Image (spheres, helix red, strand yellow):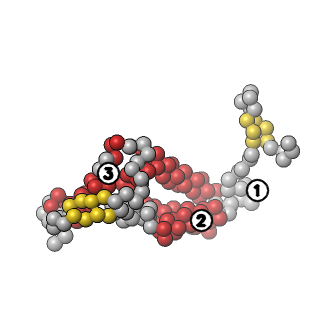
Amino acid sequence: QRLNHHVSNDPSLIQRQRKFDAVLQGFGNEPLLGLGYGRPVTFTAIDGTEITFSGDPENSYIYVLAGGGILALAALIALIVSFFGDAAVRMLRADRESRALIAFSMSFVFILLVNALSFPVLSDANLMLIMWIAMLLPGLARSDDPDRPILRLRPSFARLDGSSRAHSGRT
């Protein structure tokens, strides 16, 4: 029986909590930049044996926090928020087929990010490649109105007076 009458008695959860504690041990000394990736850590397993590992503790967010610190986790969160924000804007302006592509992309990335809570998604090169490709898919979206692009990219240069002028291509 995997789950006993109370969750606190579940051997799988106890083992994961010990892994999390081992990975975060010493994190308080360097919270901004973390402790570095690939650092070997040791913890006592449920059966009493000492286990040493140097990878993802089955929670990719704890792995990023311990390895790269608050800055790395904040950068990851900013990337995730900007992806979903950009995809939502593209979804509103896309044609029907492109909306399906964007919805698939957003759903797929969401599923991978949820799985990162209990599986080493962010430290697995194959899964990261798949996630990056899925995050690029909204860039292929077409507009439902040919006269209105999905995203308007207008390069401009800020002036000292706060106004801006469009870049004409001349220097």
Residue 65 location in percent, x, y?
A: 39, 51
Identify the residue at horizontal 13%, vertical 63% (top origin). 5
Instruction: Say which residue appears at 54% left-offset and 51% top-offset.
Output: 82
Q: Residue at x 74, y 60 (%)?
A: 146
Query: Which residue is tagged 3?
Result: 24
Pick whichever, 52 or 96, lies toward us.
Answer: 52
- Mark 2 lies on residue: 137
Q: Disc 2 residue type?
A: Leu
- At mark 3, the secondary structure is helix
Task: Please name whichever residue, 56 or 171, is drawn nearer the observer in this view of the structure.
Answer: 56
Q: Earlier in the sequence, mark 2 or mark 1?
A: 2
Q: Quadrant of the C terminus?
A: top right
* Residue 1 falls left or right of residue 77: left
Amino acid at pointer 3: Leu
Identify which amino acid the numbered label 1 is placed on.
Asp
Q: Nearer the viewer, mark 1 or mark 3?
A: 3
Q: Residue at x 54, y 55 (%)?
A: 83
**Which badge, 1 or 3, comes first in the chain's sequence?**
3
The nearer-to-camera label among 2 and 3 is: 3
| Quadrant for the N terminus in the image | bottom left
Q: Are marks 2 and 3 in contact (CB under 8 Å)?
A: no
Q: Position of residue 25 (x, y in %)?
A: 29, 50
Q: Secondary structure at mark 1?
A: loop
Residue at the spot of label 1: 147
Residue 111: tell me if it is visible.
no
- Say if 115 sits above or below 155 in the image: below
Dot 2 or dot 3: first in sequence order is 3
